Amino acid sequence: MSSAHPINQPGPITIRRNQRRVYTDDELISRLENQDGVIHASRLVKGSLEIVEKQPTRSIWSMSSWQEGWFEVQDMGSQMVVAAALEGLNELDRGLQQSSNLTIVDYCAGNGGKTLAM
């Protein structure tokens, strides 16, 4: 069935750069460019990269950059939630100048990637 072909192809792997360890997207891209895939910065979220693999040859979890904490695998939807939440917190902080009584609850928590990003 040719209409199912596009959805049977693997999509890009999205990763979130660890901004405390790696200061720019270009720094992470240059470290990963020797890996088996095409890597580019996302236009949607700062610090987000997409890896479009030519041919998956190994697990992303075996990459030394992941093992050393340079990035975390996180889908684009979750990264967009984090970006929106942080923007909202910035707006709130500008309005209140003190957000010590603020409680953030992540009702969609999986392994804590969004919480870690914030």
Image (tube, rainbow, N blue to C red):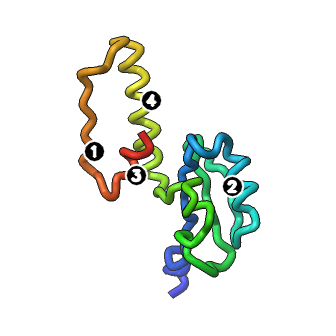
Badge 2: few (under 14), some or many (20 or more) residues near its Cα, within 10 Å?
some
Q: Quadrant of the C terminus?
A: top left
The disc at residue 87 is: 4
Give the CA separation, mark 1 to mark 4. 16 Å
Badge 3: few (under 14), some or many (20 or more) residues near its Cα, within 10 Å?
some
Q: Which residue is mark 2?
A: 40
The disc at residue 106 is: 1
Mark 2: which amino acid? His
Element at label 1 = loop
Circle nearer the N terminus (4, 3)? 4
Q: Which residue is mark 3?
A: 113
Tell me which residue sits at (65%, 71%) in the image: 53
Give the CA separation, mark 2 to mark 3. 21 Å
- Nearer the observer: mark 2 or 3; the answer is 3
Badge 1: few (under 14), some or many (20 or more) residues near its Cα, within 10 Å?
few
Give the CA separation, mark 2 to mark 1. 29 Å
